Image: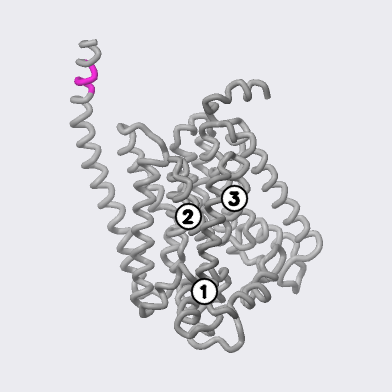
């Protein structure tokens, strides 16, 4: 016993100076990488025109200052009519955007930019120290690697440049992941509801959560969304709901041109809808018809059913939640009618977990590294295929079981 204690003390003493050096190197790496990053993608964007931010800002201004619907119409006030892309998010999203109505445009823009940087740094910290599940002595090295991966991930830079909300969304999804893993379903449901309100696409995670044995958090998410919708019914102009349901929703499916926007075949759209639209769209058309649209719905259904089956199979596994979210996040990107490059930012925590997580020993690490590199810095037209590749790798782990069986389920698993 004393020999073991002496060995443990000796290891701790040996690890002390090494840990100190690792922290110093980590701080140096942070200064070396993040200061240029925040200069170019922070200070450099203070007076930079952001193509997406005006849509959020003027939608909040129109709804809460002018008291009218912010959805596309011929008589929208300036400057929203000429300087902003059409606002197409559902009315409850306006509740989360309400603070923008109280601020002048320059201050609101800088505020979102600063918030996005805070979210990025929080994600880097949490993925390395909490999500990956690494031993304490491995965390400094993981932090350095995650820092490099985050700052080199081009969709994050595009999010900052365009004035998008994807980093807020990504942090909400990451916090949901961590809180549900810790068994705090009420808080996790509220965080997932925020993510769904911000981008809608994560709603596809709800049936997967039910199938993987997390029905409680799915229920709390629905309850939180109902509360948010109730608040929106009270504070958002009533005409906004009718406009959204009558004018926006019918143009939101596959093979359709969203209201006021461009064709889904645009090269920036890397979802299944964008890929099949480019393959099957006839000359002179803005969107595909017939075979192209049917094939998009068919492939999307197959991918959703396959992921649902994998989630059901993983319900008795200790890593079932992690494996399901690792496959579910790229699925939301593929199945969304519109998925731009900057939307890849909310897939980043899942990529890091797949690369560094304790369940990753069985994965084809080299393949994930190549796919992650394509998503980070590769050609735009290759990124949809890379997301599909990430989904395939995640599905391989999901269908393989991915780790230990929960206590009390060993017999049931063997019986299967």
Query: Which numbered disc, 1 or 2, marks the residue that appears first in the sequence?
Result: 2
Indicate the position of residue 247 as horizontal and vertical percent values.
66, 76
Residue that mark 1 sits on = 234
Furthest toward the right, the residue is 290
Q: How many marks?
A: 3
- The residue depicted at 20 percent of the width and 11 percent of the height is 2
Q: How are the colours assigned in the image?
A: one colour
Given residues 93 and 384, the one toward you in this image is 93
Query: What stretch of residues is rendered in magenta?
Result: 7-11
Inter-mark Cα distance, 3 to 2: 13 Å
Indicate the position of residue 324 as horizontal and vertical percent values.
57, 41
Residue that mark 2 sits on = 190
Inter-mark Cα distance, 1 to 2: 20 Å
Q: Residues within 10 Å of mark 3 (few under 14, many from 20)?
A: some
Q: Is residue 69 above or below residue 266?
A: below
Query: Which numbered disc, 3 or 2, marks the residue that appears first in the sequence?
Result: 2
Give the structural element (helix, strand or loop) at label 2: helix
Question: Would you say 41 lies left or right of 11 here?
Answer: right
Given residues 194 and 265, the one toward you in this image is 194
Q: Is residue 238 above or below residue 409?
A: below
Of the 4 image quadrants, the one containing the C terminus is top right
- The residue depicted at 49 percent of the width and 39 percent of the height is 354
Q: Is residue 109 magenta?
A: no
Indicate the position of residue 294 as horizontal and vertical percent values.
78, 58
Residue that mark 3 sits on = 206
- The residue depicted at 50 percent of the width and 69 percent of the height is 231
Question: Would you say 358 lies left or right of 117 here?
Answer: right
The rendered magenta stretch, by its main secondary structure, is classed as helix
Question: Would you say 206 lies left or right of 254 here?
Answer: left
Query: Which numbered disc, 3 or 1, marks the residue that appears first in the sequence?
Result: 3
Select label 1 or label 2 by which is in front: 1
Of the 4 image quadrants, the one containing the N terminus is top left
């Amino acid at each position: 016993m004393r020999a073991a204690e002496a060995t443990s003390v000796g290891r701790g003493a040996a690890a002390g100076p090494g840990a100190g050096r690792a922290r110093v190197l980590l701080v140096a790496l942070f200064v070396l990488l993040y200061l240029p990053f925040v200069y170019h993608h922070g200070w450099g964007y203070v007076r930079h025109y952001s193509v997406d931010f005006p849509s959020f800002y003027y939608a909040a201004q129109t709804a809460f200052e002018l008291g009218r619907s912010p959805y596309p119409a011929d008589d929208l006030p300036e400057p929203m009519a000429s300087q902003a892309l059409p606002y197409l998010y559902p009315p409850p999203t306006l509740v989360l955007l309400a603070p923008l109505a109280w601020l002048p445009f320059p201050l609101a823009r800088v505020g979102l930019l600063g918030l996005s940087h805070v979210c990025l740094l929080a994600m880097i910290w949490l993925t390395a120290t909490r999500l990956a599940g690494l031993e304490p002595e491995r965390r400094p090295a993981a932090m350095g690697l995650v820092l490099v991966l985050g700052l080199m991930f081009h969709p994050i830079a595009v999010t900052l440049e365009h004035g998008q909300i994807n980093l807020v969304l990504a942090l909400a999804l990451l916090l949901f992941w961590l809180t549900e893993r810790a068994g705090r379903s009420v808080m996790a449901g509220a965080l997932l509801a925020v993510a769904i309100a911000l981008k809608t696409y994560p709603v596809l995670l709800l049936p997967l959560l039910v199938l993987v044995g997390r029905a409680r958090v799915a229920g709390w998410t629905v309850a939180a969304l109902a509360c948010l919708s109730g608040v929106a019914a009270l504070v958002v102009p009533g005409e906004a709901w009718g406009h959204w349901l009558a004018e926006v929703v019918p143009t939101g499916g596959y093979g359709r041109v969203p209201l006021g926007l461009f064709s889904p075949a645009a090269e920036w759209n890397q979802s299944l809808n964008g890929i099949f639209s480019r393959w099957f769209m006839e000359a002179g058309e803005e969107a595909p018809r017939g075979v192209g649209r049917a094939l998009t719905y068919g492939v999307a259904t197959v991918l959703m059913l396959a992921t649902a089956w994998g989630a059901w199979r993983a319900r008795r596994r200790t890593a079932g939640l992690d494996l399901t979210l690792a496959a579910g996040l790229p699925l939301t990107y593929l199945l969304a009618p519109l998925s731009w490059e900057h939307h890849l930012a909310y897939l980043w925590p899942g990529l890091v977990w797949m690369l560094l997580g304790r369940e990753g020993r069985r994965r084809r690490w080299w393949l994930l590294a190549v796919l992650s590199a394509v998503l980070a810095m590769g050609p735009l037209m290759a990124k949809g295929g890379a997301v599909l590749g990430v989904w395939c790798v995640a599905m391989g782990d999901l269908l393989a079981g991915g780790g230990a069986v929960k206590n009390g389920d060993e017999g049931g698993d063997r019986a299967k």
